[in-house]
Image (cartoon, helix red, strand yellow):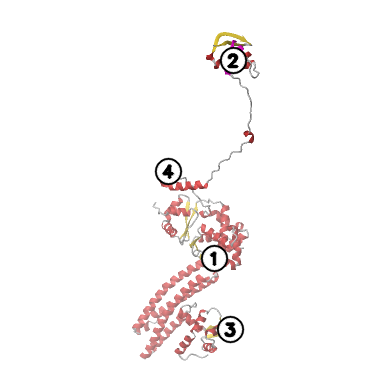
Amino acid sequence: MTSFHNITELLKTLDREKKLLTEVFEKRRIPFKWEFALLLVDEKEERLTFLLNHGIMTRNGPFVELDDQYLQFFETILEVNEEINLSYINENIQQVKQNIIYYLQENDADRQYAYLKIIKGTLRKIDRIAYRNMVDLHRNIENTFKTEPTYTIKIAKLENFDAKRQDITVLLDQAELVVTTEEQAFFTSAYDEELKQIVISLRHLINYLRHNSIELQKQVIDYLNQVKYQSRVMEKLKQVKYLKDQFELKNKTNFIEVLSNNKAVVFEVNPSYPLRLSLDVLRSDDTIEIKQRIAKRIKTGVKLTLPIAATIDAEYLNNQTEQEIFINLEEVKNSFTAAANNLFNFIMQYNFQRPVDFQERVTIYCQVVSIYQNELNITDYYQQQQQVEFALVYPK
Amino acid sequence: MLLPKQTAAIFEKLSKGQFICSNASNGDERRWYNVIDEFYEDLYAYFMAINFSLERGNEFFYFTRTEARADLERKIEAAYRLIDIVDFFKTFDQAFSAGYRFTPSQVLVRINVDATLKNKMEGLKKYTKEDTYKDSLQKVIDLLRKDNFTELENDISNTYKVLTSFAYLEELILSIDTPTEVQ
């Protein structure tokens, strides 16, 4: 493997192959085929071999991938890394410590200055790395909670992140110890304004990160509880559903008891409250529109059906004649006025158009007397015939 | 006792067996939630006088009776139905819980590719009495909506949101003790 001679060469190479590198970086989680890579370097195989030779990319059978070194570099710079590497902080703390020792032992001012410069740079690095780590941790915890589909893995990952968070806190404590108590000799002797500034900013950041860490811990605990609650619900649900499908839920669990003790209104039939209308309001004019509307609805809604009478029997429509002979009392009276007999005897002998018996003749006598009372001469003399006593009546 | 002016509206909703949730889209309901939260003691005493106990869940409120009113048969039937429905949606997505958003079409797509889910949908048909999955699913969602466990958040995109009251169902399921042999 050959290495780059200078930074310009490296940057030029990266710039030339930016199309391929972007594509490979974006698809870093899936295998990237050699043929596709070839297409992105204008089918020039030597360009691809150049990348392989210089360790920017590696070949793995039919696939190519970005070298781990570059991948990590890109991920860290673009803040998309999922790995949280604590060794950096630790390494840098060690470096600070070593350089402090060199500084204290060195007598030459120029070389002392060089060491001081390294220390300042490293402290700044710790500052940045610690901050970045916390932010990464934050993002990763959030992502894991939201996207990890399997509950067991989710719990394990969250617990891991929490352990990392603890490690970061420990490292922060160490870093603070270095700049405050452990290396007091150096920090008081190396009188440098910039160093002071850096230390203050570092301590400030450490303080800030500690608070952050507490907040993060709370969040992780909350997430873990939520996840555990959910996985508990899932587990219980599976058991309950299984028992229910086996028709054993009532017998094998306290299902009935739970429901008996449950008095929530949600299980009740939705109540309706039929209230009577206020008569006073109905009488007032305010409700006239409502009443009209309802009246209209009722008019169209209900169809009155009139009952139809049965057909008239044909028999009733046929004419029927019945003959009856009536006795004309007027005619009887007129005939009587022409006769000389008394009325009773006259009627007894009168020749009617139909046979008339004695009883009826007596009735006719009574009828004539009562109707034509004024035209007859009713005397006070009486006669008797067939046990009927009658007054003698003559025409006037 | 000084009661908030929303008391009547609160009673109206809760007495129908519904929930008042903190994450409801309806601004009124969210306000009611805050009002209850603020005047909880007063409202509790007030509703207690008419035999309703105002209960506080995790981010939701509901009514219980001082003595059981609904008959057991009905409760079992309702609980069976709810267990099936919760199981269906948890199979659709394990994260199906308070605050979850979904559209019926998402569920339908999953039904087509997930045999277990399809099977469970078939099982739910006994409650919905619908032939097509689409209608059946809509009926199931409506059942949850009627009892105020989900709501239609956006009627243009047809997005539903699971309300905090869903935790009530989870609690109900968790309160059932299962024998060790099943575990």
Query: What's under tag 2, amino acid-wise?
Result: Ser
Closer to the observer: label 2 or label 1? Answer: 2
Determine if marks 2 and 1 fall on one subunit: no
Please indicate, yes or no, whether residue A231 appears anywhere in the rendered image. Answer: no
Q: Main secondary structure of the magenta part?
A: helix
Tags 3 and 4 touching, CB below 8 Å: no
Q: Residue A318: say if magenta.
A: no
Between disc 2 and disc 4, whose residue precedes?
Answer: 4
Tags 1 and 4 touching, CB below 8 Å: no
Report crowding for label 3: few under 14, some 14 to 19, many 20 or more residues within 10 A (C-alpha).
few
Of residues A75 and A214, the one nearer the viewer is: A75
The x and y percentages for residue A15 are: 47, 86
Q: Mark 3 points at which residue?
A: A62
Query: What's under tag 4, amino acid-wise?
Result: Arg
- A16 lies left or right of B179: left
Task: Specify start and end residues of the magenta stretch as a single range.
Answer: A329-346
Q: Mark 1 points at which residue?
A: B105
